[in-house]
């Protein structure tokens, strides 16, 4: 076979895949414009416009939004920021796999229903996810290609992205360590040793200190929301309902609106919201540090006394992350009923077909189908860490995904597909790297078709 002709066809295929990705970006901008303001985003935008921040929502996101809104008001600037990070990350993956058939996977990656469901939604989960995805894409390219040129500015860009992405999502601090270790691994000439581990830990502490200082600067004294307490309230409420007696610290039992009958009536296994976020909430937040400490102490004593009930409540809440679909609330039949196309649903079989298709769609895109891949890819990455350059980014993505799931099990106050959005994005971005690792091992085990490392990694 003529090698020149082979490379020419590869170049044409890469150009075609790149063109497809660019068209997807343009169409996504046009179709999803100007983005959808979630209720949380409305609160954040109000903070941005007022310049007065609280820590119930990430103050840095509102701070950035405040200045973006001076260029163009409303959700559009934040929408452009999020979707551009998604497509830039995807373009990096596509370039990495330009000589592989996997380039076509990345050409359509942003159109995966799991991603489209949240791309237009202005919410901290989207900003956090796409920031970390872009950081991971840059790092993956650097590791696989052993980048030396422009290493410093690339690592500086990753650190800046990690600073923002961690600041906009509470749970991000639990997975940041994997990315700071990755940065240090790149800086240490792609060697995993005591020096790179120490550097990653130091960088983690520096970033967390910088985020804490920034939040302290933006949020005035007395504006802290201490939202962590709603996780404890959920746990105590779940255990109380199981035992049919109110198990709360005295300051909650003595609140004017508290009524255990209402707690049992309003409690949802999937979220704490009806108990605490309504105007006349049946449970109010603690007023001071003394009440916060009372809640913590009472919660700790209760879970020690009822560990099985606690774990059962946590497992039940966590199950909603695995079994809820990103399109759970977007039934097309209900939507069409409110449009001029409502008459179409009266045609025999149309409504039922759409409803059945929607049900299948919801089931197909639950995270529970992806969960086994987290463990499979983690095993691949660990086993081939020293033999395949793609194993390190594969480990980065899988470790981060798994850690987020563990954090959600113990620290979440609700269960929804949105909370596992990062894990979903990282795992779908990992398919090509998992194939890299597997293919590299297969080629290495077959001497007669052995190729130079730079080809055996990316060619499929």
Image: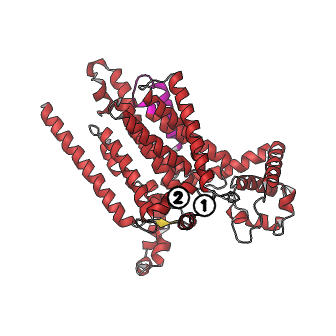
Viewer can see residue 399: yes
Percent coordinates x, y for residue 230 in the rendering:
71, 56
Give the alpha-carbon distance from disc 1 to disc 2, as whole Å. Answer: 8 Å
Sequence-wise first label, 1 or 2: 1
Classify 451 as above or below 263. above
Q: Position of residue 6 (x, y in %)?
A: 16, 35
Residue 63: numbered disc: 2
Bounds of the magenta span?
Answer: 371-392
**Quarter of the N terminus within the rendering:** top left
Question: Does the magenta run of residues contain 396?
Answer: no
Which residue: 35% across, 62% down?
Answer: 29
Q: Is residue 245 visible?
A: no
Q: Position of residue 425 (x, y in %)?
A: 46, 48
Secondary element under disc 2, as helix, strand or loop, is helix
Quadrant of the rendered image containing residue 404: top right
Please name the residue that numbered disc 1 is placed on.
53
């Amino acid at each position: 076979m003529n090698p020149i002709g082979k490379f020419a066809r590869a170049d044409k295929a890469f150009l075609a895949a790149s063109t497809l990705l660019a068209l997807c970006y343009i169409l996504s901008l046009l179709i999803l414009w100007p983005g959808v303001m979630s209720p949380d985003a409305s609160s954040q935008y109000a903070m941005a416009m007022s310049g007065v921040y609280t820590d119930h929502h990430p103050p840095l996101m509102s701070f950035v939004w405040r200045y973006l809104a001076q260029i163009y008001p409303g959700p559009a600037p934040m929408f452009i920021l999020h979707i551009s990070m998604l497509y830039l990350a995807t373009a990096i993956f596509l370039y990495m796999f330009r000589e592989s058939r996997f380039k076509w996977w990345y050409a359509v990656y942003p159109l995966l229903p799991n991603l489209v469901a949240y791309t237009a939604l202005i919410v901290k989960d989207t900003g956090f996810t796409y920031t970390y995805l872009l950081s991971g894409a840059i790092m993956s390219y650097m590791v696989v290609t052993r980048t030396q040129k422009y290493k410093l500015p690339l690592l500086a860009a990753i650190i800046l992205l990690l600073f923002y992405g961690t600041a906009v999502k509470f749970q991000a601090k639990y997975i940041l360590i994997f990315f700071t270790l990755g940065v240090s691994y790149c800086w240490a000439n792609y060697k995993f040793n005591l020096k790179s581990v120490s550097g990653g830990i130091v960088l983690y502490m520096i970033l967390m200190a910088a985020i804490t200082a920034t939040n302290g600067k933006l949020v005035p004294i007395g504006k802290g929301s201490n939202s962590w307490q709603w996780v404890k309230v959920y746990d105590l409420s779940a255990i109380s309902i199981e035992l049919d007696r109110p198990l709360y610290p005295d300051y909650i039992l003595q609140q004017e609106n508290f009524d255990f009958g209402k707690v049992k009536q309003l409690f949802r296994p999937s979220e704490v919201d009806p108990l605490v976020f309504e105007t006349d909430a049946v449970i109010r937040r603690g007023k001071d540090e003394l009440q916060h400490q009372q809640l913590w102490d009472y919660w700790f004593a209760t879970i020690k006394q009822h560990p099985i009930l606690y774990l059962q409540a946590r497992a039940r809440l966590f199950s909603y992350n695995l079994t809820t679909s990103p399109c759970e609330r977007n039934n097309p039949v209900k939507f069409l009923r409110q449009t001029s196309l409502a008459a179409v649903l009266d045609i025999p079989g149309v409504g039922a077909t759409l409803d059945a298709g929607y049900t299948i769609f919801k089931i197909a895109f639950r995270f529970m189908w992806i969960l086994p891949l987290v463990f499979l890819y983690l095993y691949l990455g660990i086993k081939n860490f020293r033999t395949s350059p793609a194993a390190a980014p594969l480990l980065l993505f899988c470790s981060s995904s798994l850690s987020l799931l563990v954090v959600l099990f113990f620290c979440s106050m609700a269960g929804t597909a949105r909370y596992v959005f990062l894990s979903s994005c990282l795992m779908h971005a990992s398919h090509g790297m998992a194939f890299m690792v597997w293919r590299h091992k297969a080629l290495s085990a077959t001497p007669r078709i052995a190729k130079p490392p730079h080809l055996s990694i990316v060619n499929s």
